[in-house]
């Protein structure tokens, strides 16, 4: 009788213990399901001194985003940024970026956002490790995203939960060239403590099997590799341009292909095409995106010299040898024509004229500027965005050699040199007609200075009166609106707002308070005068504001704004 209660008690304890085993697993499931907010994490890499390194960004808890802006990454001052991803297949999004010092500022947009796999590489940054870097040096890369704004597919703001920083660690044991980190999915694990309980072993056996399966499946997926077929030796001859055959090991499409050379003067690249400028052995690194993974492949290219059959010709005539001595021939010079000053205004586009001193054709070229936020380049065309003095450097190949040339551009706002003369024509006509007729009202010279300053501006159809910004001959809300639109352009010259002023005269007409700046105060003054002219109660009001306005009205009338 006593053994039955003991067996019953033991059975109840076993059942209770078995039920407790399910409790922590249920909590884990709820916590994972409730986790929200995408994280962007920079993955640390190891690179050799003097190499170009690809630093990948992976997503955790990914979400579909239509728009992201105001994001910056900043690196150690010795680590030089050279670019970033322009298209992400994982997010189906395009990136625009600018580099300033050690900062990469970028934004992202997508018309058809895509949710990537958890742990996927979503985009990458590219840096150059200094040649003098030593083993165990570490360069930190951090986010500056306090003003980041992201928008989901529903049009509402989306908060990116976390931005994780990373490092570029230096090791001379890594081969020189571009280094990249292959895709490694982020794996989360759960505690296996219930397995140690001998009572719960029958319960936990079926539970652990589905937990390990989803973890191991992403690991077994093959990581795509980039395969680049080297052209035959008969094609690799100095002076030739050959095309590289690029494909992936999995057969998937390779997107966003670009390439770089270990010696830009010897081998210049353009996508999959490479131009062989100088004999020798060099390295070409090809980059691309396969199923959202950034992949690279480095190949050796051995360039054969041009055939030397024509060398026998000088041997038949030893007298001509001094004439063919290349030492006597002057080296070609790269020439970049300086644009004229009347082109160097904010908002203008300027085409650079790049040529050689001996008339030889220009090969591959690259244009860089000291401040990419002030000047952007596309082919030979510069877009001037910000006033100031900047350096534009051009590198180009002439006859297989690379030459450099730099010019200095001083960009100004269109309104800067025009504001000072505004006061002269206003004050002169007012004072001159008053003083001159008093001294001699009879003599002929009196009529000349009176008629000249009055009739000449009147015949000029392009002359603007103060406050009449649209030159319509009337003072309306349209004048104030033009002032506000131009103010918005000055506040954000790199945005979507286009400048509305077409001349310096129009700026002078908008500067109603004469402080040589354009602000919302100028627009407010125009609106106040419109109200004053059209509402009788303002003309009889004794307030100080109206007294001041009447005082300004007399100035405007004297300046010709109000007839």
Image (cartoon, rainbow, N blue to C red):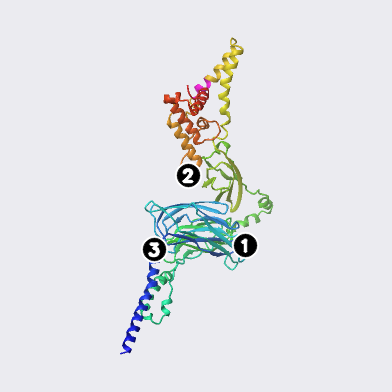
User: Circles 3 and 1: CB distance less than 8 Å?
Assistant: no
As drawn, which residue projects farthest toward the top? 442
Judged by depth in the image, the label closer to the viewer, 1 or 2, is 2
- In the picture, measured across the screen, residue 125 lies left or right of residue 209, that is right
Q: Which residue is mark 3?
A: 34
Report, in whole angstroms, how far the alpha carbon at label 3 lies from the one at label 2. Answer: 38 Å
- Residue at 58% x, 14% y is 437
The correct choice, above or below, for 248 with respect to 465 in the image is below
Q: Which residues are magenta?
A: 455-460
Q: Which residue is mark 1?
A: 133
Report, in whole angstroms, how far the alpha carbon at label 3 lies from the one at label 1. Answer: 45 Å
Please say whether residue 541 is one of the residues in the magenta stretch.
Answer: no
Q: Residues within 10 Å of mark 1 (few under 14, many from 20)?
A: some
Q: Which mark is residue 495?
A: 2
- In the picture, measured across the screen, residue 326 lies left or right of residue 85, that is right
Please say whether residue 458 is one of the residues in the magenta stretch.
Answer: yes
Secondary structure under tag 1 reads loop
Secondary structure under tag 2 reads loop
Disc on the earlier residue, 3 or 1: 3
For the residue pair 434 and 245, the one nearer the viewer reads as 434
């Amino acid at each position: 009788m006593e053994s039955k209660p003991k067996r019953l008690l033991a059975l109840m304890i076993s059942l209770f213990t078995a039920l407790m085993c399910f409790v922590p697993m249920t909590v884990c499931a709820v916590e994972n399901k409730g986790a929200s907010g995408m994280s962007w994490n920079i993955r640390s890499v190891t690179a050799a001194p003097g190499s170009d390194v690809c630093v990948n960004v992976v997503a955790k808890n990914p979400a579909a985003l239509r728009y992201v802006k105001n994001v910056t990454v900043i690196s150690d001052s010795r680590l030089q940024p050279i670019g970033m991803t322009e298209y992400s297949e994982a997010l189906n999004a395009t990136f625009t970026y600018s580099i300033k010092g050690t900062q990469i500022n970028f934004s992202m947009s997508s018309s058809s956002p895509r949710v990537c796999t958890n742990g996927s590489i979503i985009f990458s940054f590219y840096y150059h490790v200094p040649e003098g870097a030593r083993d165990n040096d570490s360069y930190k890369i951090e986010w500056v995203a306090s003003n980041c704004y992201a928008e989901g597919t529903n049009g509402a703001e989306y908060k990116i939960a976390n931005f994780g920083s990373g490092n570029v660690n230096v090791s001379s044991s890594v081969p020189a060239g571009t280094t990249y980190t292959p895709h490694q999915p982020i794996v989360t694990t759960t505690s296996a403590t219930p397995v140690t309980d001998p009572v719960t072993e029958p319960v936990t056996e079926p539970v652990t099997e589905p937990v390990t399966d989803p973890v191991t499946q992403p690991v077994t997926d093959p990581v795509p590799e980039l395969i680049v077929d080297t052209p035959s030796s008969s094609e690799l001859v100095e002076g030739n341009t050959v095309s590289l055959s690029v494909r992936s090991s999995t057969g998937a499409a390779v997107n966003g292909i670009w390439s770089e050379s270990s010696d830009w003067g010897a081998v210049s690249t353009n996508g999959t095409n490479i131009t062989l400028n100088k004999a020798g052995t060099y390295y070409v690194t090809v980059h691309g995106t396969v199923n959202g993974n950034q992949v690279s492949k480095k190949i050796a290219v051995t360039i054969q010299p041009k055939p030397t059959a024509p060398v026998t010709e000088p041997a038949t005539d030893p007298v001509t040898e001094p004439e063919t001595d290349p030492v006597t021939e002057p080296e070609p010079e790269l020439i970049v024509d300086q644009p004229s000053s009347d082109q160097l205004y904010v908002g203008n586009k300027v085409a650079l004229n790049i040529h050689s001193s001996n008339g030889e054709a220009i090969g591959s070229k690259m244009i860089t500027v000291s401040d990419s936020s002030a000047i952007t380049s596309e082919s030979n065309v510069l877009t001037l965005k910000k006033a100031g003095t900047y350096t534009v450097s051009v590198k180009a190949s002439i006859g297989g050699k690379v030459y450099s040339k730099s010019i200095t551009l001083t960009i100004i706002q269109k309104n800067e040199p025009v504001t000072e003369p505004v006061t002269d024509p206003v004050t002169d006509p007012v004072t001159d007609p008053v003083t001159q007729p008093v001294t001699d009202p009879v003599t002929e010279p009196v009529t000349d200075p009176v008629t000249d300053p009055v009739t000449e501006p009147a015949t000029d159809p392009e002359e603007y009166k103060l406050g009449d910004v649209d030159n319509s001959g009337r003072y309306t809300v349209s004048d104030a609106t033009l002032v506000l639109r131009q103010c918005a352009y000055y506040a954000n010259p790199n945005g979507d707002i286009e400048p509305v002023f077409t001349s310096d005269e129009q700026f002078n007409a908008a500067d109603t308070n004469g402080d040589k700046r354009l602000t919302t105060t100028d627009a407010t003054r125009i609106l106040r005068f419109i109200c004053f002219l059209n509402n009788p109660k303002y003309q009889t009001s004794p307030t100080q504001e109206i007294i001041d306005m009447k005082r300004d009205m007399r100035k405007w009338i004297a300046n010709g704004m109000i007839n």
